[in-house]
Image: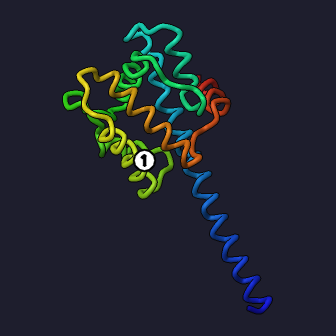
């Protein structure tokens, strides 16, 4: 293999790597935007559900990889917030796929990324057996989704999120 061929192969590999990094960073930006908008329902749900400060603390630490979501009321809070954005069908205890897809696209996702996000959420719903307690099911789905997002390196930093949320207030 000549020097030109080697340089061409290296350039091709670097281009592929840059495209992958750009895709990951743009995906992370979409997840950040989704999270900021999703969090806008927090105050209304806090009042509606009358949750304690420990739940707000859990919500603030949601994307921290080392933080374990453990409280049932966090699942209730997430369900309330999803309902405020028309992302779930409450009568069927499931995600509203079309609305979730549109929500992702409205926050910068292209069609493929929106499908990927909805598929991850759907897989998490499917992987967690139906439970009588919808809040516990929502908590399990959230934990699963959080794990998948971290595996893809798309999780936003909490510092960035809090800064964005505070600037919107």
Looking at the image, what colour scheme do you see?
A: rainbow
Figure label count: 1
Quarter occupied by the C terminus: top right
Front-most of 139 and 22? 139
Work out whether 94 lies above or below 54. Answer: below
Which residue, as the protein is rendered here, is positioned at the far right? 3
Q: Residue at x 76, y 82 (%)?
A: 7
- Residue 54 position, x and y percent, is 52, 11
Q: Secondary structure at mark 1?
A: helix
Which residue, as the protein is rendered here, is positioned at the far left? 91
In-image side of 129 versus 119 (left or right): left
- Residue 12 position, x and y percent, is 67, 77
- Residue 153 position, x and y percent, is 59, 46
Which residue, as the protein is rendered here, is positioned at the far bottom? 2
Q: Residue at x 54, y 46 (%)?
A: 151
In-image side of 83 versus 15 (left or right): left
Q: Residue at x 32, y 32 (%)?
A: 86
Quarter occupied by the N terminus: bottom right
- Residue 3 position, x and y percent, is 80, 89
Q: Which residue is mark 1?
A: 117
Work out whether 4 lies above or below 100. Answer: below
Circle 1 residues within 10 Å: few <14, some 14–19, many ≥20 = many
Work out whether 98 lies above or below 63. Answer: below
In-image side of 79 versus 113 (left or right): left
In-image side of 118 versus 149 (left or right): left
Q: Residue at x 29, y 41 (%)?
A: 126
Report which quarter residue 166 is drawn in: top right
């Amino acid at each position: 293999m000549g020097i030109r061929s080697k340089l061409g192969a290296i350039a091709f590999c670097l281009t592929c790597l840059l495209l992958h990094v750009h895709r990951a960073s743009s995906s992370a930006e979409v997840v950040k935007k989704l999270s900021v908008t999703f969090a806008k329902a927090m105050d209304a749900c806090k009042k509606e559900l009358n949750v304690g400060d420990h739940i707000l603390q859990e919500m603030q630490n949601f994307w921290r990889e080392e933080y374990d979501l453990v409280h049932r009321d966090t699942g209730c809070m997430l369900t309330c917030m999803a309902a405020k954005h028309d992302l779930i069908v409450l009568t069927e205890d499931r995600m509203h796929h079309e609305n979730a897809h549109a929500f992702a696209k409205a926050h910068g996702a292209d069609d493929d990324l929106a499908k990927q996000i909805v598929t991850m959420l759907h897989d998490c719903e499917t992987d967690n057996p139906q439970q009588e307690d919808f809040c516990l099911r929502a908590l399990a789905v959230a934990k699963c989704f959080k794990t998948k997002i971290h595996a893809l390196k798309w999780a936003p930093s909490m510092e960035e999120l809090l800064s964005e949320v505070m600037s919107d207030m």
